[in-house]
Image (spheres, coloured by chain):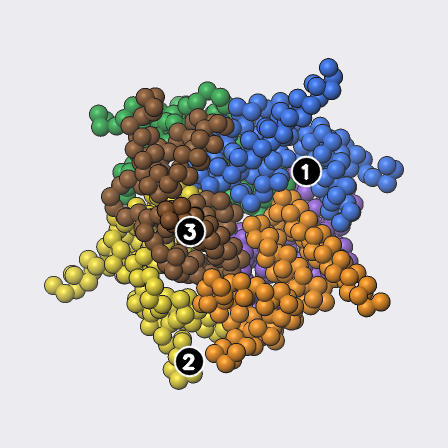
Chain colours: A orange, B purple, C brown, D blue, E green, F yellow
Amino acid sequence: MARHSQLYRQGMQEMRHHLGEKADNLIAKIESISEEFAKVNVEFPYGELYTRDILDNRVRELCTVAALTVQGFSSPQLKLHIEAALNCGVSREEIVEIITQMIAYAGFPAATNALLAAKEVFDETSKAEAQKTEAQD
Amino acid sequence: MARHSQLYRQGMQEMRHHLGEKADNLIAKIESISEEFAKVNVEFPYGELYTRDILDNRVRELCTVAALTVQGFSSPQLKLHIEAALNCGVSREEIVEIITQMIAYAGFPAATNALLAAKEVFDETSKAEAQKTEAQD
Amino acid sequence: MARHSQLYRQGMQEMRHHLGEKADNLIAKIESISEEFAKVNVEFPYGELYTRDILDNRVRELCTVAALTVQGFSSPQLKLHIEAALNCGVSREEIVEIITQMIAYAGFPAATNALLAAKEVFDETSKAEAQKTEAQD
Amino acid sequence: MARHSQLYRQGMQEMRHHLGEKADNLIAKIESISEEFAKVNVEFPYGELYTRDILDNRVRELCTVAALTVQGFSSPQLKLHIEAALNCGVSREEIVEIITQMIAYAGFPAATNALLAAKEVFDETSKAEAQKTEAQD
Amino acid sequence: MARHSQLYRQGMQEMRHHLGEKADNLIAKIESISEEFAKVNVEFPYGELYTRDILDNRVRELCTVAALTVQGFSSPQLKLHIEAALNCGVSREEIVEIITQMIAYAGFPAATNALLAAKEVFDETSKAEAQKTEAQD
Amino acid sequence: MARHSQLYRQGMQEMRHHLGEKADNLIAKIESISEEFAKVNVEFPYGELYTRDILDNRVRELCTVAALTVQGFSSPQLKLHIEAALNCGVSREEIVEIITQMIAYAGFPAATNALLAAKEVFDETSKAEAQKTEAQD
């Protein structure tokens, strides 16, 4: 897409690295409502911030999972970043551990809802992998 | 102190590893208001959670800094955990980077206040180190 | 209804101006649980505050949309006030713009959820208008 | 269960007093994801805090309902504690009253969502009681 | 003041019962900025809600302390309601206990800040009482 | 400054329009901690969002005041945007009115703190104007 900036293309590539195919679906959905929103969503966190070398993606995604656990209301984004954390090489055990740690900073309701969100993502991921394996046999 | 549980002693040791002398001061202050509160504050996050092997303290403290940045209202605790992150080997640059990342998840006001809190901690730390060096000369 | 105060009747009228038929449905539902809650819900924001001349309803509703976007957890009320904003003459483009502006103050998760809520309201509104037009033909 | 601590068994008993059978279901669900999380969820609020004599369970649960109303995002836990409040002898009228009071501290959206959550719990409770009565006839 | 409604006068009386002389100071300060804000602040929570018989003031104030503890950012109001709770007959021990309970629902940072706020109020109250006793001798 | 992007220069100009001299002071302070943070703070909200024609600055700033009132913890930014609203032509009466409206969406503590913040800004502004007038005489 010629009309997109260098920053956008770089961001889209980074976003796909974190979210796989869901990156394109999410941005297409947002773009159907607002091109400006979709543009800044790609360029700003993914093009501008996540590509900087100072922290690796594993740590970045674990921190985002911690932050969204504490935020409480952003469960769709929390699920997305739990999946992104898995895609970046974080283990299920580490995700569960950081959510458990957040009990201390945000209490049980926020942490319980994050734990159940993680369970949903793990189940979906297991199912998707099982289907892929089956298709290959 | 014989009256403390094994979990408490383990927690106090872990807490000192994160917060240095401030651990004892903080717990003494809380204990003067409520022994129960001080007890669970030591036993639960530090004795029970932080001693588990699954994540190292660097990552745990970076995640806590991210979470408290997003929480917005807990600046005394944010400053404490920025210092704890430094004590656990996180660099200033990494702390600033994770706070900058949080712009995307909680907006500029929360992230700006966290950045200014980090500056205060860095300045205090530099000053304390300068005094220590001076005293040694 | 003779039992209602002047303030209540004034509030109910203002509320209908913002929410159309949904005003009566919402209040009836709340009244079935608590008469007191329904009473203050009509009298206080709509009877007391919204009828004051200092700001027009367009600006009031845009500010409420901004505020509920940032609040994050109140999506049913956000959808209601997106509809109210449309009823008070705010354009879809303006609603999307103010939600986009809120990225800067509350981050992407809160703003994305508000954007998707706006999309739902716009789709429902388009559908309702199409049905009305059809019925008239 | 021999492997559980004294504190855990005490907490489980207290939790059943508040939540009935739902206590065991909830903990089993959490335990299937994380044994550590389930353990601290039972031991800490129920074993450690709720068993202390200083406040009775009626007041404790009403305060929790108030707190979760204000928190806004924790509706599953709010519904659980509305039910717990009923189980501890709080009346429906008192629950509705404290939610109404919270309008003053957290605004209408948070309080309205809590009121509708209370309605759902009341309806489920009435239905369950009707079925029990029917079964006995 | 002849210009005030019956509801306002009733609210002002209730507010003085909770906050003593601070009620008049607070309302005077608010009134100097906005008469409307002062009016609804007196009429709505104190005139309309707190005068209802369904819950006693002890429970109402304890619930407000719990709610503002969880809210995190409203420390001036939390301190005010800790004092109001004392004025309504709640003991210091009960206030500390409900704040401690809130660790489970909002985490340590929110609860710690509330505990330290309680300490400040207790110290001010003790000092004021000591001065009063001294003055009487 | 040659090193800055077109977007940055445009953002800095817009930011000065909203915040006057404070824009440069704020950015210089942030830049001394993190160049990246300062860059995105100028480019993103001011360069990218606020320069779009869809809403005028009066409405944008009133919405931001409403949003930060509800957010509760961001008082330094709230004060900044109350001043920005005044600079963009919003009247004091309108600012007080929108804060009063927010009682309905976020309760009295958040709105009271915003009202007192507005009072501080108004007093500072009056004082600064008086000094300017005096200097001219």
- Residue C130 - label: 3
Instruction: Give the residue drawn at x 60%, y 31%.
Output: D121
Outermost residue toward the left in this view: F137
In the image, which is nearer the foreground, mark 2 or mark 1? 2
- Residue D45 - label: 1
Task: Work out whether residue B105 can be spotted.
Answer: yes
Spatial CA distance of label 2 from label 1 is: 53 Å
Q: Is mark 1 on a helix, strand or loop?
A: helix
- Same subunit, tags 3 and 2: no
> In the rendered structure, which amino acid carries the disc numbered 1?
Pro
Give the residue number, with chain letter if any, for mark 2: F4
Q: Residues within 10 Å of mark 3 (few under 14, many from 20)?
A: few
Q: Is mark 3 on a helix, strand or loop?
A: helix
> In the rendered structure, which amino acid carries the disc numbered 2?
His
Q: Residues within 10 Å of mark 1 (few under 14, many from 20)?
A: many
In the image, D67 versus D28, the foreground residue is D28
> In the rendered structure, which amino acid carries the disc numbered 3?
Ala
Circle 1 chain: D
Outermost residue toward the front in this view: C137
The quadrant in which the C terminus of chain E is found is top left
